[in-house]
Amino acid sequence: MSLTGKRRTRRPWFFVFTLLLTCVLLFFALRGVDWHEMLITAQQGDLRLGGLAVLILSFSYFLRGMRWRVLLSNQKDFSPLMAFWGICVGYLGNNFLPARVGEIIRSVMVGRRLGISKSYVLATVLTERVIDAMTLAVFGGLAFSFLENTPSWLERATISFGGMGVLGLLALFIVPRLEGLLIPFLKRLPMPGGVRIRAVDLFAQFLKGMRAFHNVNRVLRFMALTTVIWLVDALTAIVVAMSFGFVLTLPQAAVLLAALGLASALPSTPGYLGIYQFVAVTVLKPFGLNQNQALVFILAFQAVIYIVVVLWGLLGLWRLRVSKTSQASDGFGIRAVVSEEQQE
């Protein structure tokens, strides 16, 4: 059976698993909920503060674009606005398509616009994700020192997540320095000649993308932007809570974001339906919010995210000039995007 055939065979099982996980988590999150109280709480929301949260999160996405641009500028400089469109297109794909294919979409589209290797662009995206995970774990870990009555399992998970982030960071520095060993090893692997050439080229571009983080000035700028980004995201959560009269402190918001980041690593349906609800109910209860309030908060928080990614993501698709072929294909052009990456 071909590799493509195997993937097609596994897809239904993966979908069934993620759907089952979503249903189980939703069951535990919604068990015993008072729908009438939830409705009353939701109706008390302040739309003006909700609009402010949309603006704040939009600014966070712009900063994420600036941060990604720090890595990509190692290969080619480009406008901050193009980086913003790329980030928004990627998040649009991640929120509506499985397996984080939004990262592939933004890598191919921006790489095509800049005229640089899409494999290199994807490497910078993965580098960004590793650093993001590590910073989020540290961010959440620091917040624990300011809080009481936090779930012990979350503290342990954050420490484990941080450890994996540190290992990923070490790999970013070590793997590119082993190119002299890895490339010859890859060339000796038993595979067809054309496939071998393609694999070696892809790996070389990937190593080049990882080296973007080897410049001290670039590292400092990247980490400074990362810190600001997570503070802005925490502010978004605080404003959403304020819109319903809930009190959420900065350390509490940091722990919540760390938990949501940990949970997003699990296989899930697009939009993290079920996972976000379960995490919110579990994490926010020790902070004084009951089940109904936690669910109202997380649904409003997700609504803010969807408004931002749909608004700026669709505009980003237009600004990055999606081809007619891509527009006509399923999943916001993912078939055409992947096909183009394979043919590069």
Image: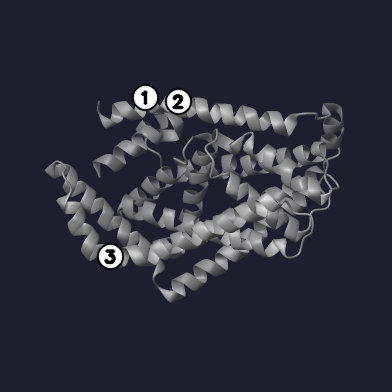
Disc marking residue 9: 1
**Residues marked 2 and 1 touching at CB (< 8 Å):** yes
Position of residue 144 relative to residue 21, above or below, is below
**Distance of label 3 from label 1 (alpha carbons):** 36 Å
Where does the C terminus fall, quadrant-wise?
top left
The relative height of residue 110 versus residue 231 in the rendered view (above or below) is above
Tell me the kind of residue under disc 2.
Trp
Q: Secondary structure at mark 2?
A: helix
Quickly name the residue at label 2: 13
Say left or right for 343 vs 243: left
Q: Nearer the viewer, residue 49 or 265?
A: 265
The three-letter code of the residue at mark 1 reads: Thr
- Say whether residue 268 is left or right of residue 174: right
Mark 2 to mark 1 CA distance (whole Å) = 8 Å
Residue 8 visible, this orientation: yes
Decide which of 82, 64 is in the foreground and name it. Answer: 64
Q: Residues within 10 Å of mark 1 (few under 14, many from 20)?
A: few
Secondary structure at badge 1 equals helix
Which of the numbered marks, if any, corresponds to residue 206? none
